[in-house]
Amino acid sequence: MTAPIRGVVPPLAIPHKDGKLDTVSLKRHINRMIDAGIHALFVLGSSGEVVFSTSQRRGEILEATQSIVEGRIPVIAGVIDTETDRVIEHIRQAESFGVDAVVATAPFYALQGEAEIYRHFHTLREATDLPLWAYDIPVCVHTKLSNRLLMDLGGQGVLSGVKDSSGDDVAFRWLARANEEAGHPLQLLTGHEVVVDGAYMSGADGAVPGLGNVDPHAYVRMWDAFQAGDWERVRQEQDRLADLMRIVQVSGVQGFGAGIGAFKTALKLLGVFDTNDMPTPVKPLEGENVAWVEAVLRQTGMLD
């Protein structure tokens, strides 16, 4: 697929059962989101447990996803790893499963500067004919990709797009303005869940909302309203999704366990996943936290 990737692109949450990939739940999950009208799927991102997954598990996820999607929408794959040569190995694997684009972060663990990051993306570009996206997620890789770097790489044809999970709304707005002034060389997708409306106003080409696993219909409705110029409907949908996002406000659990743990728990309560199991060493939500997720789902109309 050669058309630019835009619209609602959920980062695929991964169901587990008895320590293995639950392909039955995965099929329900992917088909539910495609039926809701999503425009593409981001596999093996942060929500997709890429850093928890061995190369073998990454391959299992890619193979299962592609067999379910069957070309109905584009599939973009995270090829995230610490350093360039390791990323290239993941690119080769993703290519073998016929994905439509690959997504890479800056190198991490070994401390590096912007010159090395610049060379990293150039080297990845030379290693594949697939569209290459940059994943800006400084909370995980401890490097914020500068707008200058991104615009240089976009203008040179090294990058096709940016998945922005920086949480830096000012930098994103400046990036969107620079992108427009340069003729829009980059597709820009926000990783926000609760201020997607603001990203659309800034010039985003779409969203990669983890909460889209739970309520893909609402994000598609918001995108459709944005395309129609119906900003009041955009605001209404975003306000409700902001309320739904409160499922992550669980007790005694932080970070990945709270966020993805809440998404998986919601999907189990909705009958999409058979379990809310998490990758080792993260524990699934239990007890009062499950009750909290259920209460928020009821308050926002997801459960009767």
Image (tube, rainbow, N blue to C red):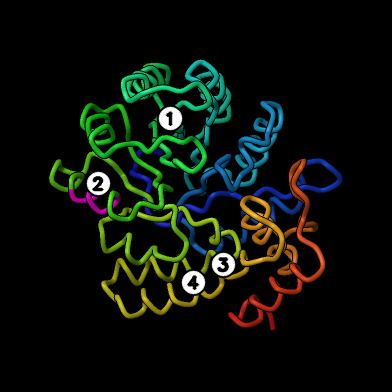
Are the residues at dot 2 and dot 4 in contact (C-beta closer than 8 Å)?
A: no
Residue 175's mark? 2
x, y percent for residue 106? 43, 30
Residue extent of the magenta highlight? 172-177
Residue neighbourhood size for the residue with mark 4, other residues' Cα within 10 Å, grouped as few (<14), some (14–19), many (≥20)? some
Instruction: Indicate which disc, 2 or 4, sits on the residue closer to the N terminus.
Output: 2
Under mark 3, the amino acid is Asp
Quarter of the view holding residue 294: bottom right
Instruction: Indicate which disc, 1 or 2, sits on the residue closer to the N terminus.
Output: 1
Instruction: Indicate which disc, 3 or 2, sits on the residue closer to the N terminus.
Output: 2
Quarter of the view holding residue 149: top left
Are the residues at dot 3 and dot 1 in contact (C-beta closer than 8 Å)?
A: no
C-alpha span from label 3 to label 2: 28 Å
- Rendered residue at 30%/50% (across/down): 172
Residue nearest the observer in this picture, 261 or 161: 261
Badge 4 marks a residue whose secondary structure is: helix
Badge 2 marks a residue whose secondary structure is: helix
Residue neighbourhood size for the residue with mark 3, other residues' Cα within 10 Å, grouped as few (<14), some (14–19), many (≥20)? many
The residue beneath circle 4 is 242
Residue 215's mark? 3
The residue beneath circle 1 is 106
Under mark 4, the amino acid is Ala
Badge 3 marks a residue whose secondary structure is: loop
Instruction: Indicate which disc, 4 or 1, sits on the residue closer to the N terminus.
Output: 1
